[in-house]
């Protein structure tokens, strides 16, 4: 159900949409994955990324106010660094979408199977249903209303807060020591895994057209979103490590285990509902964004021309959707054949999204004018680059994908057509003194009866006189 931003959003509604864009299904699994990598030291990784969210949010908010881009971070990279950067960033996000859809479906299926007490086959069946629903919603162009979005985001925040608050009395301080059992290096690797939860700060660009006075409202919305998301993430991570301890890394559904400590038998169904809402919403939004980006890439020569639909006003290409669905099925088949879980998919997805975020932050260094905004962009770029470097050999993945995009764009010429303006950008009104009055045909007023008679008889008389004057016999006489 692709979200559409209504006109004149209030502060609360815009904040809810922003928080909903940041909260993804990874919040249900990432605390356990980070605890598996760094143990209690994963809490330091969460804290560092929450602190890094401040310059990231400031950078992308300033970019959204000054440069409205329908192509997202890829469009910003093109403004700052040219067409090759557009192809590189666009390919990274385009190729990350099938991985994100499969990871979301697997998380939802895993939580549903745990809640029902079923095994792996039931979880895979539910994951297949979620994946089908994600692409079917984009086929029919389904979207949610503003009130429904507000209600869903409110329910998600309430459930996550309930899990953290009700399980907090069961935190055991023994599970938090030693804080760094293997040194500081695993903390960096945990941050590389967790970055997927902090890669949606550019979503404020979609709110620019719907918020009244965006230059004043969007910074407040971003600040509120940073506080809400940071408190939720830190609270869930602390409770997961403090309550589950070493078993957090081996628990298939840690969110259900937390709810069991708080609300008892109702934990399973409640966690399954939260998982389905998060996975379906995030997957549908990811695929819808990739379809629009695929059209833009095809129009500018970074993808084959047959992937675009020139006459489609909504910007949805059926061929792009088919390519995304086929790629998601291929990723699902590889995971099924190799018995790969959610962890490797989230690690690859996190590295791809970190590369995209790094491109947007470095574009802010070039595009933002004042030194304060540039300083925020520099800090955001430095932190993202460190996190990306901590991913180790997985850095090769965005490098290969980006190089493939640049190579394809270099050997193929883009279609020559006029650039399409952003739907929200309207042409400036022409000055009144420059407007030309519309052309009107001159209407002749009917003549009075005597004048009509004179004009009717004058024509033949003149014609006969001319003929007589031209006659040679008449001339000799």
Image (tube, grey):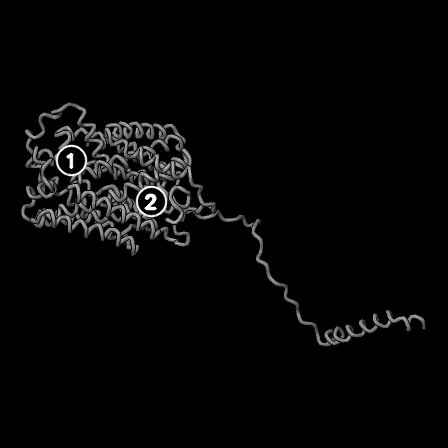
**Residue farthest toward the front in the current orientation of the protein:** 337
Find residue 457 and report its image quarter: bottom right
Give coordinates of residue 15: x percent, y percent: 27, 43
Query: Is 296 drawn above or below residue 198 in the view shown?
Result: below
The Cα–Cα distance between marks 2 and 1, rounded to whole angstroms, is: 31 Å
Residue 232, numbered circle: none
**Nearest to viewer (mark 2 / mark 1):** 1
On the image, numbered disc 2 is attached to which residue?
A: 206
On the image, numbered disc 1 is attached to which residue?
A: 33
User: In percent of the image, x 41 and y 33: which residue is there?
Assistant: 81
| Upstream in sequence: badge 2 or badge 1 | 1
- Which quadrant holds the C terminus? bottom right
Judged left or right of residue 84, residue 175 is left
Mark 2 touches mark 1? (CB < 8 Å): no
User: In percent of the image, x 12 and y 50: which residue is there?
Assistant: 122
Give coordinates of residue 176: x percent, y percent: 9, 29
User: In percent of the image, x 39 and y 52: which residue is there?
Assistant: 309
Mark 2 lies on a secondary structure that is: helix
């Amino acid at each position: 159900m692709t979200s559409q931003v209504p006109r004149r959003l209030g502060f609360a509604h815009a904040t809810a949409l922003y928080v909903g864009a940041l909260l993804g299904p990874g919040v249900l699994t990432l605390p356990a994955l980070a605890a598996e990598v760094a143990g209690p030291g994963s809490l330091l990784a969460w804290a560092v990324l929450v602190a890094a969210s401040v310059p990231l949010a400031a950078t992308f908010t300033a970019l959204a106010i000054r440069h409205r881009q329908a192509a997202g971070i890829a469009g910003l990279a093109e403004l700052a660094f040219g067409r090759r950067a557009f192809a590189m960033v666009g390919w990274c996000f385009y190729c990350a979408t099938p991985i994100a859809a499969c990871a979301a479906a697997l998380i939802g299926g895993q939580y549903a199977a745990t809640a029902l007490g079923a095994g792996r086959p039931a979880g895979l069946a539910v994951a297949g249903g979620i994946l089908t629903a994600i692409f079917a919603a984009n086929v029919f162009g389904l979207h949610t209303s503003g009130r429904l979005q507000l209600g869903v985001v409110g329910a998600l925040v309430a459930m996550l807060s309930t899990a953290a608050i009700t399980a907090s009395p069961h935190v055991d301080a023994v599970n938090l020591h030693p804080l760094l059992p293997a040194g500081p290096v695993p903390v960096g690797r945990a941050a590389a895994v967790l970055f997927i939860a902090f890669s949606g700060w550019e979503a404020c660009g979609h709110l620019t057209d719907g918020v009244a006075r965006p230059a004043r409202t969007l910074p407040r919305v971003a600040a509120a979103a940073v506080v809400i998301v940071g408190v939720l993430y830190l609270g869930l991570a602390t409770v997961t490590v403090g309550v589950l301890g070493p078993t957090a890394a081996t628990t298939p559904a840690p969110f259900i285990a937390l709810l069991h400590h708080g609300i008892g038998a109702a934990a399973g169904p409640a966690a399954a509902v939260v998982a389905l809402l998060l996975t379906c919403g995030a997957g549908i939004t990811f695929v819808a964004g990739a379809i629009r980006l695929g059209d833009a890439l095809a129009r500018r020569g970074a993808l084959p021309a047959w992937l675009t639909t020139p006459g489609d006003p909504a910007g949805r290409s059926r061929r792009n959707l088919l390519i995304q669905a086929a790629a998601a099925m291929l990723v699902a088949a590889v995971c099924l054949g190799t018995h790969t879980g959610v962890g490797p998919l989230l690690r690859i997805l996190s590295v791809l999204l970190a590369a995209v975020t790094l491109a947007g932050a470095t574009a802010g260094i070039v595009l933002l004018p004042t030194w304060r905004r540039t300083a925020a962009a520099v800090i955001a770029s430095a932190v993202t680059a460190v996190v990306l470097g901590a991913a180790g050999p997985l850095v090769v993945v965005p490098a290969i994908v980006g190089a493939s995009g640049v190579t394809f764009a270099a050997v193929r010429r883009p279609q020559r057509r006029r650039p399409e303006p952003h739907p929200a950008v309207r042409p400036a009104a022409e000055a009144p003194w420059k407007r030309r009055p519309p052309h009107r045909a001159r209407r002749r007023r009917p003549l009075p009866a005597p004048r009509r008679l004179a004009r009717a008889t004058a024509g033949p008389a003149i014609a006969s006189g001319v003929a007589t004057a031209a006659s040679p016999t008449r001339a000799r006489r």
